[in-house]
Amino acid sequence: MLPGILEQARMFLKEVIPEGGTAVDATAGNGHDTLFLTGCTGPEGKVYSFDIQQQAADNTASRLKNAGAEAEIIVSGHQHALRYIQEEVIDAAVFNLGYLPGSDKTVTTTPETTIAGLEGFLNRLKKGGRVVIVVYHGHSEGKVEKDRLLTFSEALPQKEFQVLQYQFINQKNSPPFLLIIEKK
Amino acid sequence: MLPGILEQARMFLKEVIPEGGTAVDATAGNGHDTLFLTGCTGPEGKVYSFDIQQQAADNTASRLKNAGAEAEIIVSGHQHALRYIQEEVIDAAVFNLGYLPGSDKTVTTTPETTIAGLEGFLNRLKKGGRVVIVVYHGHSEGKVEKDRLLTFSEALPQKEFQVLQYQFINQKNSPPFLLIIEKK
Protein backbone atom coordinates (compact mmCIF):
# COMPACT_ATOMS: atom_id res chain seq x y z
CA MET A 1 0.00 0.00 0.00
CA LEU A 2 1.23 3.50 -0.76
CA PRO A 3 2.54 5.05 2.44
CA GLY A 4 0.52 7.91 3.90
CA ILE A 5 1.78 11.47 3.83
CA LEU A 6 3.34 11.47 7.30
CA GLU A 7 5.05 8.12 6.86
CA GLN A 8 6.37 9.18 3.45
CA ALA A 9 7.63 12.47 4.89
CA ARG A 10 9.75 10.52 7.34
CA MET A 11 11.08 8.25 4.61
CA PHE A 12 12.19 11.30 2.60
CA LEU A 13 13.94 12.67 5.70
CA LYS A 14 15.58 9.46 6.87
CA GLU A 15 17.12 8.84 3.45
CA VAL A 16 19.33 11.93 3.75
CA ILE A 17 20.14 12.12 7.47
CA PRO A 18 23.23 10.14 8.45
CA GLU A 19 24.12 9.05 11.97
CA GLY A 20 25.91 11.99 13.52
CA GLY A 21 24.09 14.40 11.21
CA THR A 22 22.31 17.67 11.87
CA ALA A 23 18.56 18.06 11.44
CA VAL A 24 15.99 20.72 12.22
CA ASP A 25 12.36 20.50 13.23
CA ALA A 26 11.09 23.93 12.19
CA THR A 27 7.74 23.41 13.94
CA ALA A 28 8.17 21.38 17.10
CA GLY A 29 4.45 21.06 17.79
CA ASN A 30 4.00 18.07 20.04
CA GLY A 31 7.51 16.82 19.34
CA HIS A 32 6.76 13.78 17.18
CA ASP A 33 9.09 14.85 14.38
CA THR A 34 11.76 16.10 16.76
CA LEU A 35 11.87 12.67 18.37
CA PHE A 36 11.95 11.00 14.98
CA LEU A 37 14.88 13.19 13.90
CA THR A 38 16.88 12.27 17.01
CA GLY A 39 16.46 8.65 15.96
CA CYS A 40 17.96 9.52 12.56
CA THR A 41 20.95 11.50 13.80
CA GLY A 42 21.61 9.21 16.76
CA PRO A 43 23.31 10.37 19.97
CA GLU A 44 26.34 11.72 18.10
CA GLY A 45 24.16 13.98 15.95
CA LYS A 46 22.35 17.21 16.66
CA VAL A 47 18.68 18.13 16.38
CA TYR A 48 17.30 21.66 16.71
CA SER A 49 13.63 22.11 17.36
CA PHE A 50 11.84 25.47 17.03
CA ASP A 51 8.42 26.63 18.09
CA ILE A 52 6.98 30.00 19.04
CA GLN A 53 4.68 28.45 21.65
CA GLN A 54 5.96 27.52 25.10
CA GLN A 55 3.33 24.80 25.24
CA ALA A 56 4.85 23.16 22.19
CA ALA A 57 8.35 23.38 23.61
CA ASP A 58 7.17 21.81 26.87
CA ASN A 59 5.33 19.03 25.07
CA THR A 60 8.39 18.33 22.97
CA ALA A 61 10.74 18.34 25.97
CA SER A 62 8.45 15.93 27.76
CA ARG A 63 8.25 13.58 24.80
CA LEU A 64 12.02 13.53 24.41
CA LYS A 65 12.60 12.94 28.12
CA ASN A 66 10.23 9.99 28.14
CA ALA A 67 12.13 8.50 25.20
CA GLY A 68 15.58 9.26 26.63
CA ALA A 69 16.41 11.44 23.64
CA GLU A 70 17.97 14.90 23.40
CA ALA A 71 17.44 17.91 21.18
CA GLU A 72 17.98 21.63 21.47
CA ILE A 73 14.52 23.11 21.87
CA ILE A 74 14.28 26.81 21.13
CA VAL A 75 11.21 28.95 21.77
CA SER A 76 11.54 31.13 18.71
CA GLY A 77 10.17 31.30 15.19
CA HIS A 78 11.94 29.29 12.49
CA GLN A 79 12.66 32.54 10.62
CA HIS A 80 15.31 33.18 13.29
CA ALA A 81 16.70 29.66 13.24
CA LEU A 82 20.08 30.45 11.73
CA ARG A 83 20.95 32.54 14.78
CA TYR A 84 20.89 29.38 16.82
CA ILE A 85 22.27 26.73 14.51
CA GLN A 86 26.02 26.36 14.96
CA GLU A 87 26.64 23.88 12.15
CA GLU A 88 27.56 25.26 8.75
CA VAL A 89 25.53 22.69 6.91
CA ILE A 90 22.39 20.80 7.84
CA ASP A 91 21.21 17.50 6.44
CA ALA A 92 17.49 18.08 6.60
CA ALA A 93 14.69 20.18 8.00
CA VAL A 94 10.97 19.53 8.38
CA PHE A 95 7.98 21.84 8.62
CA ASN A 96 4.47 20.89 9.67
CA LEU A 97 2.43 23.89 8.65
CA GLY A 98 -0.82 25.00 10.24
CA TYR A 99 -1.64 25.07 13.96
CA LEU A 100 -0.48 23.14 16.99
CA PRO A 101 -2.64 19.99 17.24
CA GLY A 102 -4.62 20.06 20.46
CA SER A 103 -4.28 23.83 20.91
CA ASP A 104 -6.86 26.54 20.26
CA LYS A 105 -5.92 26.76 16.57
CA THR A 106 -5.57 30.56 16.66
CA VAL A 107 -1.79 30.42 16.33
CA THR A 108 -0.78 29.19 12.89
CA THR A 109 2.30 29.34 10.74
CA THR A 110 2.24 32.30 8.36
CA PRO A 111 3.45 32.61 4.75
CA GLU A 112 6.07 35.27 5.49
CA THR A 113 7.76 33.50 8.36
CA THR A 114 7.45 30.07 6.77
CA ILE A 115 9.19 31.25 3.61
CA ALA A 116 11.80 33.22 5.56
CA GLY A 117 12.59 30.11 7.59
CA LEU A 118 12.62 27.92 4.51
CA GLU A 119 15.06 30.24 2.72
CA GLY A 120 17.40 30.08 5.67
CA PHE A 121 17.43 26.29 5.71
CA LEU A 122 17.89 26.05 1.94
CA ASN A 123 21.02 28.21 2.29
CA ARG A 124 22.48 25.81 4.83
CA LEU A 125 21.48 22.50 3.23
CA LYS A 126 24.21 20.08 2.28
CA LYS A 127 24.31 18.84 -1.29
CA GLY A 128 21.65 16.13 -1.38
CA GLY A 129 19.99 17.48 1.75
CA ARG A 130 16.23 18.02 1.93
CA VAL A 131 13.60 20.24 3.41
CA VAL A 132 10.31 18.38 3.75
CA ILE A 133 7.16 20.42 4.26
CA VAL A 134 3.85 18.92 5.33
CA VAL A 135 1.37 21.39 3.90
CA TYR A 136 -1.87 21.51 5.88
CA HIS A 137 -4.19 23.87 4.07
CA GLY A 138 -7.68 23.10 5.37
CA HIS A 139 -7.80 26.07 7.75
CA SER A 140 -8.64 29.59 6.57
CA GLU A 141 -5.05 30.88 6.49
CA GLY A 142 -3.83 27.64 5.04
CA LYS A 143 -4.88 28.20 1.46
CA VAL A 144 -3.01 31.50 1.28
CA GLU A 145 0.10 29.92 2.77
CA LYS A 146 -0.12 26.96 0.39
CA ASP A 147 -0.37 29.22 -2.66
CA ARG A 148 2.53 31.40 -1.56
CA LEU A 149 4.64 28.38 -0.84
CA LEU A 150 3.90 26.78 -4.21
CA THR A 151 4.75 30.02 -6.02
CA PHE A 152 8.02 30.26 -4.11
CA SER A 153 8.89 26.60 -4.68
CA GLU A 154 8.06 26.57 -8.39
CA ALA A 155 10.48 29.46 -8.86
CA LEU A 156 13.45 27.76 -7.20
CA PRO A 157 16.23 27.39 -9.79
CA GLN A 158 16.20 23.97 -11.41
CA LYS A 159 20.01 23.86 -11.46
CA GLU A 160 20.20 24.12 -7.69
CA PHE A 161 17.09 22.36 -6.41
CA GLN A 162 14.65 19.59 -7.19
CA VAL A 163 11.15 20.34 -5.91
CA LEU A 164 8.77 17.41 -5.66
CA GLN A 165 5.06 17.67 -4.87
CA TYR A 166 3.64 14.44 -3.45
CA GLN A 167 -0.12 14.56 -3.09
CA PHE A 168 -3.11 12.26 -2.85
CA ILE A 169 -5.66 13.92 -5.09
CA ASN A 170 -8.89 11.97 -4.55
CA GLN A 171 -9.38 12.67 -0.85
CA LYS A 172 -11.98 14.96 0.67
CA ASN A 173 -11.40 17.77 3.20
CA SER A 174 -8.12 19.28 1.94
CA PRO A 175 -5.75 16.60 3.24
CA PRO A 176 -2.13 17.64 3.69
CA PHE A 177 0.40 17.10 0.92
CA LEU A 178 4.19 17.10 0.81
CA LEU A 179 6.71 19.41 -0.75
CA ILE A 180 10.23 18.01 -0.84
CA ILE A 181 13.03 20.40 -1.77
CA GLU A 182 16.38 18.74 -2.39
CA LYS A 183 19.63 20.60 -2.96
CA LYS A 184 21.49 19.37 -6.02
CA MET B 1 18.99 12.10 -4.99
CA LEU B 2 15.28 11.91 -5.67
CA PRO B 3 14.67 9.43 -8.47
CA GLY B 4 13.47 10.85 -11.76
CA ILE B 5 9.95 10.30 -13.01
CA LEU B 6 10.67 7.25 -15.17
CA GLU B 7 12.77 5.51 -12.52
CA GLN B 8 10.14 6.23 -9.89
CA ALA B 9 7.38 4.91 -12.18
CA ARG B 10 9.21 1.60 -12.35
CA MET B 11 9.67 1.48 -8.60
CA PHE B 12 5.92 1.95 -8.11
CA LEU B 13 5.27 -0.87 -10.58
CA LYS B 14 7.86 -3.32 -9.31
CA GLU B 15 6.58 -3.04 -5.73
CA VAL B 16 3.26 -4.63 -6.66
CA ILE B 17 4.17 -7.14 -9.40
CA PRO B 18 5.13 -10.55 -8.03
CA GLU B 19 7.06 -13.20 -9.94
CA GLY B 20 4.48 -15.07 -11.96
CA GLY B 21 2.20 -12.03 -12.01
CA THR B 22 0.28 -10.36 -14.80
CA ALA B 23 1.13 -6.89 -16.06
CA VAL B 24 0.06 -4.67 -18.92
CA ASP B 25 1.91 -2.10 -20.96
CA ALA B 26 -0.95 0.00 -22.31
CA THR B 27 1.34 1.93 -24.66
CA ALA B 28 4.10 -0.30 -25.99
CA GLY B 29 5.96 2.52 -27.74
CA ASN B 30 9.53 1.36 -28.21
CA GLY B 31 9.08 -1.47 -25.73
CA HIS B 32 11.15 -0.21 -22.81
CA ASP B 33 8.39 -0.67 -20.26
CA THR B 34 7.23 -3.96 -21.78
CA LEU B 35 10.72 -5.35 -21.32
CA PHE B 36 10.86 -3.97 -17.79
CA LEU B 37 7.54 -5.63 -16.94
CA THR B 38 8.76 -9.02 -18.19
CA GLY B 39 11.61 -8.65 -15.72
CA CYS B 40 9.08 -8.14 -12.92
CA THR B 41 6.77 -11.03 -13.77
CA GLY B 42 9.61 -13.40 -14.70
CA PRO B 43 9.20 -16.27 -17.19
CA GLU B 44 6.26 -17.76 -15.26
CA GLY B 45 4.31 -14.52 -15.52
CA LYS B 46 2.44 -12.81 -18.32
CA VAL B 47 2.86 -9.42 -19.93
CA TYR B 48 0.45 -7.89 -22.44
CA SER B 49 1.61 -4.99 -24.54
CA PHE B 50 -0.73 -2.82 -26.59
CA ASP B 51 -0.11 -0.23 -29.26
CA ILE B 52 -2.14 1.03 -32.21
CA GLN B 53 0.97 1.48 -34.37
CA GLN B 54 2.59 -1.45 -36.16
CA GLN B 55 5.93 0.33 -35.90
CA ALA B 56 5.66 0.32 -32.10
CA ALA B 57 4.75 -3.37 -32.05
CA ASP B 58 7.72 -4.18 -34.27
CA ASN B 59 10.09 -2.12 -32.15
CA THR B 60 8.83 -3.81 -29.02
CA ALA B 61 9.09 -7.31 -30.52
CA SER B 62 12.63 -6.57 -31.59
CA ARG B 63 13.62 -5.27 -28.16
CA LEU B 64 12.16 -8.32 -26.44
CA LYS B 65 13.84 -10.73 -28.84
CA ASN B 66 17.22 -9.11 -28.27
CA ALA B 67 16.74 -9.52 -24.54
CA GLY B 68 15.39 -13.06 -24.75
CA ALA B 69 12.11 -11.99 -23.17
CA GLU B 70 8.50 -12.73 -24.11
CA ALA B 71 5.28 -10.75 -24.05
CA GLU B 72 2.01 -10.82 -25.92
CA ILE B 73 2.12 -7.84 -28.25
CA ILE B 74 -1.23 -6.74 -29.59
CA VAL B 75 -1.75 -4.11 -32.29
CA SER B 76 -4.86 -2.56 -30.83
CA GLY B 77 -5.81 0.38 -28.64
CA HIS B 78 -5.74 -0.10 -24.87
CA GLN B 79 -9.47 0.66 -24.74
CA HIS B 80 -9.98 -2.82 -26.20
CA ALA B 81 -7.47 -4.52 -23.90
CA LEU B 82 -9.94 -6.55 -21.85
CA ARG B 83 -10.89 -8.50 -24.97
CA TYR B 84 -7.40 -9.91 -25.03
CA ILE B 85 -6.50 -10.32 -21.38
CA GLN B 86 -7.34 -13.83 -20.16
CA GLU B 87 -6.50 -13.34 -16.50
CA GLU B 88 -9.27 -12.26 -14.16
CA VAL B 89 -7.02 -9.96 -12.19
CA ILE B 90 -3.94 -8.01 -13.14
CA ASP B 91 -1.20 -6.77 -10.84
CA ALA B 92 -0.30 -3.59 -12.63
CA ALA B 93 -0.59 -1.56 -15.81
CA VAL B 94 1.44 1.34 -17.16
CA PHE B 95 0.61 4.12 -19.61
CA ASN B 96 3.08 6.47 -21.27
CA LEU B 97 0.86 9.16 -22.70
CA GLY B 98 1.68 11.31 -25.73
CA TYR B 99 3.28 10.21 -28.96
CA LEU B 100 5.64 7.43 -29.99
CA PRO B 101 9.19 8.69 -29.40
CA GLY B 102 11.04 8.82 -32.72
CA SER B 103 7.85 8.84 -34.80
CA ASP B 104 6.21 11.76 -36.59
CA LYS B 105 4.33 12.83 -33.44
CA THR B 106 0.99 13.03 -35.25
CA VAL B 107 -0.36 9.94 -33.54
CA THR B 108 -0.96 10.59 -29.86
CA THR B 109 -2.99 9.02 -27.11
CA THR B 110 -6.38 10.67 -26.69
CA PRO B 111 -8.42 11.47 -23.58
CA GLU B 112 -11.38 9.24 -24.52
CA THR B 113 -9.38 6.10 -25.26
CA THR B 114 -6.93 6.68 -22.42
CA ILE B 115 -9.74 6.93 -19.88
CA ALA B 116 -11.63 4.00 -21.42
CA GLY B 117 -8.51 1.87 -21.19
CA LEU B 118 -7.78 3.04 -17.67
CA GLU B 119 -11.31 2.18 -16.51
CA GLY B 120 -10.91 -1.30 -17.88
CA PHE B 121 -7.66 -1.91 -16.02
CA LEU B 122 -9.03 -0.48 -12.77
CA ASN B 123 -11.87 -3.01 -12.97
CA ARG B 124 -9.39 -5.85 -13.23
CA LEU B 125 -6.79 -4.70 -10.70
CA LYS B 126 -6.04 -6.92 -7.74
CA LYS B 127 -6.32 -5.42 -4.29
CA GLY B 128 -3.09 -3.47 -3.85
CA GLY B 129 -2.50 -3.40 -7.61
CA ARG B 130 -1.56 -0.20 -9.39
CA VAL B 131 -1.97 1.65 -12.64
CA VAL B 132 0.94 4.02 -13.21
CA ILE B 133 0.51 6.78 -15.78
CA VAL B 134 3.38 8.86 -17.11
CA VAL B 135 1.60 12.05 -18.14
CA TYR B 136 3.40 13.88 -20.93
CA HIS B 137 1.55 17.11 -21.53
CA GLY B 138 3.94 19.36 -23.44
CA HIS B 139 2.32 18.71 -26.85
CA SER B 140 -0.82 20.51 -27.96
CA GLU B 141 -3.25 17.64 -27.23
CA GLY B 142 -1.45 16.87 -24.02
CA LYS B 143 -2.87 19.62 -21.88
CA VAL B 144 -6.44 18.57 -22.67
CA GLU B 145 -5.64 14.95 -21.92
CA LYS B 146 -3.91 15.89 -18.66
CA ASP B 147 -6.90 17.92 -17.47
CA ARG B 148 -9.41 15.20 -18.35
CA LEU B 149 -7.30 12.60 -16.63
CA LEU B 150 -6.92 14.67 -13.46
CA THR B 151 -10.66 15.30 -13.33
CA PHE B 152 -11.32 11.58 -13.76
CA SER B 153 -8.73 10.60 -11.15
CA GLU B 154 -9.78 13.13 -8.53
CA ALA B 155 -13.30 11.71 -8.70
CA LEU B 156 -12.28 8.10 -8.06
CA PRO B 157 -13.92 6.94 -4.81
CA GLN B 158 -11.58 7.28 -1.87
CA LYS B 159 -12.86 4.04 -0.35
CA GLU B 160 -11.77 2.05 -3.40
CA PHE B 161 -8.67 3.81 -4.67
CA GLN B 162 -5.70 5.89 -3.59
CA VAL B 163 -4.63 8.37 -6.26
CA LEU B 164 -1.18 9.87 -5.88
CA GLN B 165 0.23 12.69 -8.00
CA TYR B 166 4.03 12.74 -8.07
CA GLN B 167 5.40 15.80 -9.80
CA PHE B 168 8.53 17.92 -9.96
CA ILE B 169 7.18 21.46 -9.96
CA ASN B 170 10.21 23.69 -10.61
CA GLN B 171 11.17 22.38 -14.06
CA LYS B 172 10.72 24.18 -17.35
CA ASN B 173 9.04 22.83 -20.50
CA SER B 174 6.10 20.88 -19.04
CA PRO B 175 8.01 17.81 -17.87
CA PRO B 176 5.98 14.62 -17.39
CA PHE B 177 4.52 13.74 -14.01
CA LEU B 178 3.14 10.54 -12.53
CA LEU B 179 -0.32 9.47 -11.50
CA ILE B 180 -0.41 6.30 -9.45
CA ILE B 181 -3.81 4.71 -8.86
CA GLU B 182 -3.81 1.92 -6.31
CA LYS B 183 -6.77 -0.32 -5.57
CA LYS B 184 -7.53 -0.57 -1.86
Image (cartoon, coloured by chain):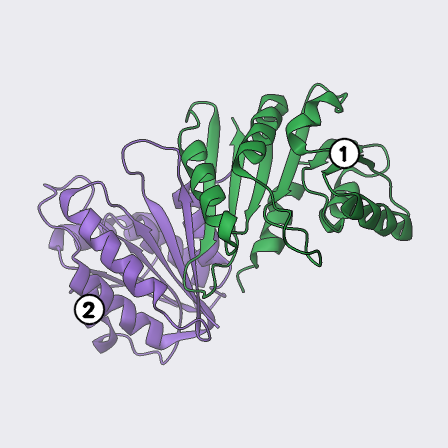
Chain colours: A purple, B green
The chain holding disc 1 is B
The total number of labels drawn is: 2
Q: Where residue B117 appears, x then y in whole percent?
A: 61, 30
Q: Which disc number belongs to residue A97?
A: none
**Residue at position x 48%, y 28% in the image:** B161
Is the N terminus of chain B in the top left, top right, bottom left or bottom right quadrant?
Answer: bottom right
Question: Which residue carries the number 2 mark?
Answer: A79
* Chain ID, mark 2: A
As helix, strand or loop, the secondary structure at mark 1 comes to: strand
Residue B179 pos. (x, y %) = 51, 43
Q: Amino acid at mark 1?
A: Tyr
Q: Which image quadrant for residue A161?
A: bottom left
> Residue placed at 85% from the left, 47% from the top?
B64
Q: Which residue occupies 20% across, 42% down?
A: A101
- Residue at the bottom extreme, as displayed: A88
Amino acid type at mark 2 = Gln
Q: Residue at x 40, y 45 (%)?
A: A167
Q: Nearer the viewer, residue B151 or A144?
A: B151
Marks 1 and 2 in Cβ contact (< 8 Å): no
Mark 1 lies on residue:
B48
Q: Do we see residue B104 in this rendering?
A: yes
- Judged left or right of residue A63, residue B6 is right
Point out residue A78 in the picture as x, y percentages from the top left corner. Answer: 21, 65
